[in-house]
Image: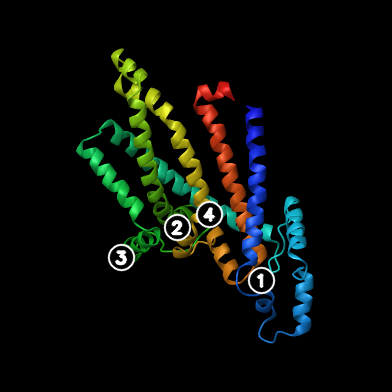
Amino acid sequence: MLRYIGRRILIAIPTLIIVSLLVFALQKLLPGDPVLTMAGEERDPQVLAFLREKYRLDDPIPVQYFAWIGSALTGNLGISLRTDIPVLDLIMSKLPVTLELAIMAMIVALAIGIPAGIISAVRKGTAVDYTANVIALSGLSIPNFWLGIMLIMLISVRWQLLPASGYVPPTEDLWLNIKTMIMPAFVLGTGLAASLMRHTRSAMLGVMRSDYIRTARAKGLLSRKVILKHALRNALVPIVTLSTLLFGELLAGAVLTEQIFTIPGFGKLIVDAVFNRDYAVVQGVVLCTAVGFIFMNLLADVLYVLVNPRLRHSA
């Protein structure tokens, strides 16, 4: 197992290097000059020169890259050009918010998608199957921002059941925190639930046509036991893959939802940084997101081995 994980980590290292190069290079292609934004309206030449020297913006691009990546390896992602706060501190203050939203959205997706996929596969060709597929297609088609706005108008404005926006840390008021996060988690989770439902249905249909499933049924095993113990367990590999990748997307792709519900997470941080030409923050957030994706892929590989005994022996 450790050798298997080590091989996956070695594969991830070149990926991280390529991602860091892309992040740094694409950041330099953004229009605008962050120093002019920081200097204000007067733009004194001495102030501009001081700022360029302070943030090493006059150094050659390769020198800037190696200085940045060298600092990043030690945990120093630089200083925000806008707020003069360490980027790592900004990320650590926003990451728990987005992480909480992603976990709640993933719970919604798993609670809806996997049972719906199993039922749809078991009842293939029936009205239940067609209804589940229609709902899944609707979940994939409806944009998150539209669903979020509709939920705010209906649940918050008309019925006044939940707060329309904002965020309260769970350490201050746990119940209010849950109330403020229910709608954004549902908005994010429904789209993921639709994808999980489709993949679960497809995986279950493939497994249920296998010989060992027919043998289990012929032995007189209960239908529920055949489905949950034999079929579902062998269908979990693609479901685990999709779930881990979707969770990685949640950490990076909650930008619109966080903007709609005014949640001060990763999404708002990256949007503000792009508008303010805050290069250090953009680079730090994107790099952390890439590391998160790679970690989720590594986690998926480990879960493969735990779920499937055949992979466990080959690892």
Left/right placement of residue 225 relative to residue 42 reads left
Q: Nearer the viewer, mark 2 or mark 4?
A: 4
Q: CA distance from mark 4 to mark 3?
A: 31 Å
Front-most of residues 103 and 234: 234
Q: CA distance from mark 2 to mark 4?
A: 20 Å
Q: Nearer the viewer, mark 4 or mark 3?
A: 4
Residue 82 — which label? 1
What amino acid type is highlighted by mark number 4?
Ala
Residue at image location 53% in from the left, 25% down from the top: 311
Q: CA distance from mark 3 to mark 1?
A: 39 Å
- Residue underneath mark 2: 180
Identify the mark nearer the N-term, 1 or 4. 1
Q: Secondary structure at mark 3?
A: helix
Residue 19: where, in percent of width, then height? 63, 52
- Residue underneath mark 3: 158
Question: Which corner quadrant holds the C terminus?
Answer: top right
Q: CA distance from mark 2 to mark 3?
A: 16 Å
Q: Nearer the viewer, mark 1 or mark 4?
A: 4
Residue 220 in the image: above or below residue 258:
above
Residue 91 in sight here: no
Q: CA distance from mark 2 to mark 1?
A: 29 Å
Identify the mark nearer the N-term, 2 or 1. 1
- Residue underneath mark 4: 252
Quick one: label 3, few (<14), some, or many (20+) residues within 10 Å? few
Front-most of residues 164 and 288: 288
Q: Secondary structure at mark 4?
A: helix
Residue at image location 56% in from the left, 24% down from the top: 312
Residue 158: where, in percent of width, then height? 30, 65
Question: Which corner quadrant holds the N terminus?
Answer: top right
Q: Residue furthest top?
A: 219
